[in-house]
Image: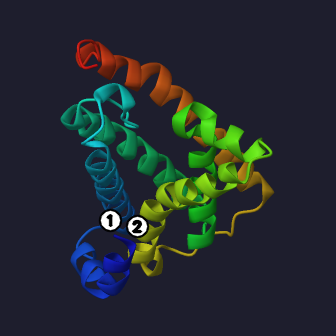
Amino acid sequence: MAAVVHRCRRFLSGVMSRWAPGRAFWVAGWVGGLLTEFFAVLANREKLPADRVLMHPDPWVDLVFGVFYYGFFMGLWLLLRRRWAFSKTHVFLVSGLFGLATEQGGAILAGVASPSVLGVLLAVPVMCVYGIFPTLALLLTETRWPVLPRPGVRAFAVTALGFFFFWAFYGLVIHRGLLAVFPKAGLS
């Protein structure tokens, strides 16, 4: 996905120039996140439902969860990017660290803290998966944003707090609400 977007960035930027930079950024990241989730569904399709590493074991329902997850994820980045001029490196690292901390209930982060080298090896692809889609969205829109202050310590503290609230709100409210509509029962 990254190679295709990078290669077609002029064309995609032109298509997205019809929208305000914030809307284009959000849409590009949201679509990129959904594509990421679609690839995760494809990678898990042969596994038993109980063994799938998805937000929901039913692939189609997982994509519905993704609509909300990536929408809110990019909504947070949009709010942050409207205030501070986060670079592509910032967006990639912050998103990647968020993924590292939250993927599989923190199991990846626990693996990094273990003495095994395997934990570190698993951390790199997880960080890349979480970092790439918002970074590509910024790649497509970065020249169109107004001049904003560079993020400092305060901006990164607000960002960390924002991602904590996103994680808590999505997990405690959105995810639980979606599970009430789309229960996992009977899929094992």
Residue 119 coordinates in the image, percent (x, y):
67, 48
Reply above or below: 33 against 136.
above
Within 10 Å of disc 2 (Cα), the crowding (few <14, some 14-19, many 20+) is many
> In the drawing, does residue 129 fall left or right of residue 155?
left
Q: Residues within 10 Å of mark 1 (few under 14, many from 20)?
A: many
Classify residue 62 by image quadrant. Answer: top left
Q: Marks 2 and 1: CB-CB under 8 Å?
A: yes
Q: Position of residue 138 (x, y in %)?
A: 45, 70
The residues bearing labels 2 and 1 have C-alpha atoms spaced at a distance of: 8 Å
At x 45% / y 46%, what residue is drawn? 73
**Mark 2 against mark 1, which lies toward the viewer?**
2
Q: How is the image coloured?
A: rainbow
Amino acid residing under circle 2:
Ala
Q: Is residue 171 above or below residue 150?
A: above
**Depth check: 149 or 50 in front?**
50
Residue at screen point 62% across, 42% down = 108
Inspect the image, locate mark 1, and give the three-letter code of the amino acid beneath it: Ala
Quarter of the view holding residue 50: top left
Left or right side of 63 for 165: right
- Residue under circle 1? 24
* Residue toward you, 84 or 88: 88
Quarter holding the C terminus is top left
Sequence order check: which comes first, mark 2 or mark 1? 1
- Residue 164 makes an appearance in the image: no
Q: Secondary structure at mark 2?
A: helix
Q: Is 43 on the left or on the right of 150, as rendered?
A: left
Q: Position of residue 133 (x, y in %)?
A: 42, 61
Q: Element type at marker 1? A: helix
Q: Residue at x 29, y 84 (%)?
A: 8
Identify the residue at image location x=62%, y=53%: 123
Q: Which residue is mark 2?
A: 137
